[in-house]
Amino acid sequence: MSFSRMIVIAKSSPHVLNPVLFALHLGIHFVTTYPHIHKSQIRLEKLKWSRIVIPNAGGSTGDGMPPGHKHSFVRDGEEKETVEVWVDATKGTDDLSATIKAGLKDLLRESLISILSFPWLAVSPPFPLICCNANRCDKS
C-alpha cells in the first residue's frame, strides 16, 4: 500500500482515531476500489504521544488546545496498540470477510515496573510470568 494513499484516506476517515476501525476501513477501501485487488492485509501500530510542555506557559493556548506546544510532541511511554486486518473479497465485493487481530505490545513491562515500585506491595521476585505469542507460551 502506498503511504501517501493512507494519508489521504486518514484525512477523510471518521475512524482515524480508532486503529481497528481505521485498519478495517483501509482494507475494505482497497478491495472495493481496485478491481484487480481481492485481498488486503493492513498492519497498524498506534503509539502514545503527548504535547511538549512549555515551561511557564500558563493555561490553554487560547484555541482550546491543552497547555503545550501546538505542533510538537514527544513519545509518552513504550506501549503500542497493534492491529492486523485481513480483508478477503475473493467471493466478490458483496460478500466480504475480515479477520482482525488486535492487542497491546510492550505494556506488561511498564505496568509491572510501576506496580512493583509501590513500597506497600510485598512481592519479591522471582515471581512467575507467562509470556505468550501466537506460536508458543513460555513460563519463566
Image: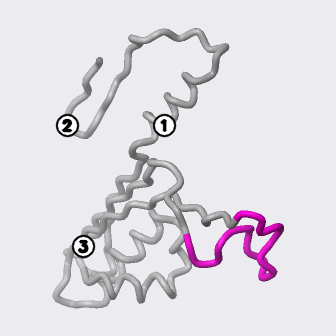
Where residue 13 appears, as percent x and y from the top left, is 51, 82
Reading the chain from its start, which is encountered first: label 3 or label 2?
Answer: 3
| Nearest the eye: 96 or 73 | 73
| Label 3: which secondary element | strand
Does 126 sit above or below residue 19? above
Where residue 44 appears, as percent x and y from the top left, is 36, 64
In the image, farthest residue toward the left: 36
User: Magenta residues?
Assistant: 55-72
Image quadrant assignment for residue 139: top left
Q: Which mark is residue 40?
A: 3
| Nearest the eye: 28 or 129 | 129
Q: What is the three-letter code of the residue carrying label 3? A: Ser
Camera-nearest label, 3 or 2: 2
In the image, farthest residue toward the front: 56
| x 21%, y 90%: residue | 35
Q: Would residue 2 appear left or right of 45 to someone viewing this image?
A: left
| x 24%, y 73%: residue | 40
In the rendered structure, are the residues bearing label 3 and label 2 in contact, judged by CB atoms less than 8 Å apart?
no
| Label 2: which secondary element | loop
Q: Is residue 67 within the magenta segment?
A: yes
Cα–Cα span, label 1 and label 2:
24 Å
Q: Which residue is mark 2?
A: 135
Q: Which mark is residue 37?
A: none
| x 36%, y 57%: residue | 100
Q: Which mark is residue 110?
A: 1
Q: How many marks?
A: 3
Q: What is the three-letter code of the residue carrying label 2? A: Asn
Number of other residues with Cα within 10 Å of mark 1, as a class: few under 14, some 14 to 19, many 20 or more: few
| x 37%, y 77%: residue | 26
Reading the chain from its start, which is encountered first: label 1 or label 3?
Answer: 3
